[in-house]
């Protein structure tokens, strides 16, 4: 599945906001990501057109199965990579920022090997893996 990093970021943000707030609207994404309203509007239109989200008449956004799958994959990578880096001694801020960069580009093979190594060496918290 080939999707741009920015679309992955939007889908991940929707997932995080849904977990935190329950319901998500475009303005929530604007505030969360500190993006402009027009850029979020254009991104939501593209995500709708590509079948990743749907938006109801009141502007509430729901992830569709393909969008949910991508969002979960990226968010899982983010959480695991952040935890791994923090347990290596990286500051929480740098770990989160670096995880954001790595999560989009790392291959599934490399990610799986990092997770296996981290598990074998006790570098992941059980709560983060769920």
Image (tube, rainbow, N blue to C red):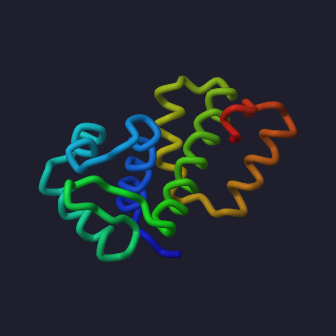
Residue at (59, 27) in percent of width and height:
90
The percent position of residue 54, horizontal first and vertical second, equals 33, 65
Q: In this view, does 35 lie above or below 44?
A: above
Say whether residue 130 is left or right of residue 104.
right
Q: Is residue 70 left or right of residue 76?
A: left
Question: Among all residues in the image, which is located at the extreme right?
Answer: 120
Q: Closer to the camera, 55 or 125?
A: 55
- Residue 125 lies, in percent from the top left, at 73, 30
Q: What residue is drawn where x is 62% and y is 41%?
A: 81
Pick the quarter of the image with the C terminus.
top right
Residue occupying image coordinates x 58% and y 56%: 73
x and y percent of residue 112 in the render?
Answer: 74, 55
Q: Where 15 falls versus 43 (above or below)?
A: above
| Left or right of 43 in this view: 88 | right
Task: Say above or below: 68 vs 13.
Answer: below
> Where does residue 82 sit, x and y in percent of width and height?
58, 36
- The front one of 25 and 106 is 25
Q: Quadrant of residue 85?
A: top right
Q: Nearer the viewer, residue 101 or 128?
A: 128
Find the residue positioned furthest to the front: 57
Instruction: Pick the residue in front: 107 or 49.
Output: 49
Q: How many labels does the image show?
A: 0
Q: Residue at x 82, y 31 (%)?
A: 122
């Amino acid at each position: 599945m080939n999707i741009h990093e920015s679309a992955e970021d939007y889908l991940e943000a929707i997932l995080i906001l849904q977990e935190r707030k329950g319901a998500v609207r475009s303005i929530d994404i604007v505030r969360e990501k500190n993006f402009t309203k027009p850029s979020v509007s254009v991104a939501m239109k593209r995500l709708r057109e590509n079948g990743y989200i749907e938006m109801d008449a009141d502007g509430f956004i729901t992830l569709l199965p393909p969008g949910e799958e991508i969002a979960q994959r990226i968010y899982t990578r983010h959480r695991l990579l952040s935890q791994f880096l923090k347990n290596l001694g990286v500051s929480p801020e740098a770990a989160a920022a670096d995880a954001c960069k790595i999560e989009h580009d790392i291959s599934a093979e490399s990610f799986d090997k990092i997770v296996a190594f981290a598990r074998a060496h006790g570098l992941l918290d059980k709560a983060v893996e769920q």
